[in-house]
Amino acid sequence: MATLDSTLSNFVGEGRALDADAKGARATSFWNSSPMQAKAMLLPSSADEVAQILGHCNSTGQSVITQGGLTNCVTAAEPGLDDVVISTEKMASIVEIDKVGGTAVVEAGAVLQNVQEAVAREGMYFPLDMGARGSCTIGGNIATNAGGINVLRYGMTRNLVLGLEAVMADGTVMSSMNRMLKNNAGYDMKQLFIGSEGTLGVVTRAVLRLYPQPASRQDALVAMTSVDAVIGFLGKLQREIAGNLSAFEIMWGRYYRAVTGENGHRPPLSRDYPFYVVFTAEGSDPDADAACFERVLEQAFEEKLIIDAVMPKSAAETRAIWEIRENFEPALVNPPFYLYDISLPIRDMQAYVAEVEANVEKRWNGAMCITLGHMADGNLHFFVAPGEQGDFHEDSDRCVYDPLRQYGGSVSAEHGIGLEKLSWLPHSKSAAEIELMRSLKRTLDPNGILNPGRVVGD
Amino acid sequence: MATLDSTLSNFVGEGRALDADAKGARATSFWNSSPMQAKAMLLPSSADEVAQILGHCNSTGQSVITQGGLTNCVTAAEPGLDDVVISTEKMASIVEIDKVGGTAVVEAGAVLQNVQEAVAREGMYFPLDMGARGSCTIGGNIATNAGGINVLRYGMTRNLVLGLEAVMADGTVMSSMNRMLKNNAGYDMKQLFIGSEGTLGVVTRAVLRLYPQPASRQDALVAMTSVDAVIGFLGKLQREIAGNLSAFEIMWGRYYRAVTGENGHRPPLSRDYPFYVVFTAEGSDPDADAACFERVLEQAFEEKLIIDAVMPKSAAETRAIWEIRENFEPALVNPPFYLYDISLPIRDMQAYVAEVEANVEKRWNGAMCITLGHMADGNLHFFVAPGEQGDFHEDSDRCVYDPLRQYGGSVSAEHGIGLEKLSWLPHSKSAAEIELMRSLKRTLDPNGILNPGRVVGD
């Protein structure tokens, strides 16, 4: 096994350069429990330390994998034996919260939930949210332009980042720590580092946009008989709850049945409906908001958009209906599973899902395809379970991606491309776009040391 | 005068290549009524025609200036005698409006107001809005990442563009016409063309994000005695009107007095107050929204945040209070005037404005500095009027920009850099950022033909 480069270990503090044995005690990722493999793992504590590391790696052609909370879904952060790992875990400070300006300055290694909670203690709100909140880091959120459950109202991570600091491949520290909502002084350099999955630079710090904490919140779990009814209900909420609607998550009946029942969550609604939606409204006027929410729900019954509904009466009940959406582990009983994260125009969703289901059923006897997602964002997740042992990843990909192209859909709504989806990138990007991506990669990382092979290939 | 290149005129339809005489009948820009100077003006009708023009210009090193509605504030679109002009005016179609997906496909030359109105006829809402709405084009809005009065709620143009098509310097058509809210399949190439002021490509088409039309709207004009009270009132609205607050515009008393009165607008409130704010809430629940709006206004009186207020009772009255903010012509009686567009953290605004005013008063006897802006976005506009004849642009710039640096402010919140602010770019961007900008420019436009000299210099 390769040994630790002593030059590199000098760039970080005592005990912050882990050799093969030390980092081997860590799992590879959230999804892969085998011991992490890498030449070395460095835990720098500042952008300057990252700059020294990258400067050296750039001059020696040493590949570097940057790691945050290891919840990446597309194997982007899993190192190989010859890679040096930079973990941002020792850069996890929440540096400043400005309530008047509505901004927080945080380091890249800060865990999302810690940021959410620190901001909440100041009476403010950071709306980025997703199931991985307890592990994922702000740096990883930025690198992948993370989405999650509040995109409908607040946008993706890109919309919530006002400024950032990143270290480029040659060790240049690119400080672009803008704190204003508006800044058109020159090209907006931070956009390059958001969503490029660590291939153009290592994000070390960011200025986040905060919102006031909502004074009211209502949630409900409802059931429908058709995708048209779901679309009709979404339209009604967008007109009548409008700016207060912050989450709208669809679950196909098959998903709901797979995660509830004997070995799963307690079902708050009958398990026999074709479609379920869990949604959230957040507002500033508790009485009026609650009245409006209930009125809209009642009308939706009368208009036959929904056929059943439950409104949680406590924080625990709210948590319980969201657990059905967020904790899908009860469905994962018979591996292998393949997870997807596509997006397409909402009007084409029903036809597309039917095609995917048909493809999966045709390919394997006893296969399962369960579907859920951020409907209002045009974003669906699938779990495809062939129901037999074997490596069927490519077959499964074809079932999902082949019908997507005709709708101008994306093979990755929010997870990114990483290594896993590289061969499918041409499904969603034109040759001109891919050539421009490569051209940017060559310009910003001419020696190809940053997360090599990810997103743009080699 | 240089003659029209016949190769170029062959790329566009009959009558769509204007020679020196024909385009000389046009004014240079909204701000400059002298006849436009250029080698030729071409009016292509498609991305393919633009591609042919750029391919030819790229191979011959011919500089190209792209024009939309000519309302640019930083002389970015004013051509010189040796430039070829591409006007997008013949690419002005509104191609498709998808109500379910909440998207509109439009050509770059479509005038903003036409897009707003076409979308409204379908019961939808495109929230980008500014005083220049009747002239400015979507392509120009995208090229400058335009801001305007609804940024607080809906973000800048960047947040409202889901996809775009641009022609690159070498004639490559970069089609990235994504229609989904979420698409993380590879680098987000459209970000390069948004806000780069036409220096990296010519935008020809875009997919815009639409919202449902708000069912309710309330406006008010209020008066305050201090910036602290304005900040306190903004905070109250952000907590208590929250997601419904869509505009919040501050006017210093001096601005209000300059645009109202004998030769100006009728003043709906006394002209003696130190600060005025005009603001808008848009919601989905007319009765509850109106009650909430009035309750918050009453409380703001009781809490001494505001000292006077008027609520318009008709669309005409609403228009009238907004005219005070948007139509500043009554203030512009004694040229020269220099217009600014800075941003800085809200908490530093009061100290900064006092410094600018002191600088202006110290520099010229009888000078006027009037201040207004998108307060909630941290964005202020100044008109500096030295009160004497002469070219004082640089002196005036120093009065405004010198105190800005210490606050990490931006010399351009929304207007861009163009040619006018080029020398001030290092005030708001680090050397590393500027070098990266240049590196991008070299990569995407190696012969420097696109809007040469703008934003990144030569």
Image (cartoon, coloured by chain):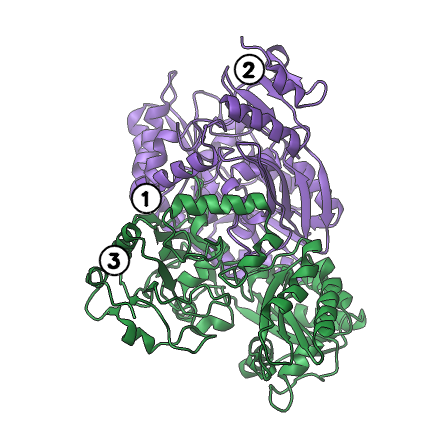
Chain colours: A purple, B green
- Where, by quadrant of the figure, is residue A295 drawn? bottom right
Q: State whether residue A454 is above or below residue A403.
A: above
Question: Split into 4 quadrants, where in the image is the N terminus of chain B?
Answer: bottom left
**Considering the numbered disc 2 on the image, is that residue within a helix, a strand or a loop?**
loop
Chain of the residue under the numbered disc 3 shown in the image: B
Q: Can see residue A292? A: yes
Q: Can see residue A295? A: no
B315 with respect to B300 (left or right): left
Residue marked by disc 3? B49
Q: State whether residue B362 is above or below residue A213.
A: below
Cα distance between the residues tagged 2 and 3? 53 Å
Categorize mark 2 by other alpha carbons within 10 Å: few (<14), some (14-19), many (20+): many
Residues at marks 2 and 1, common chain?
A: yes
- Where, by quadrant of the figure, is residue B124 drawn? bottom left
Residue marked by disc 1? A351
Could you tell me residue A46's position as x and y percent? 67, 32
Could you tell me residue B79's position as x and y percent? 39, 66
Residue closest to the far bottom: B262
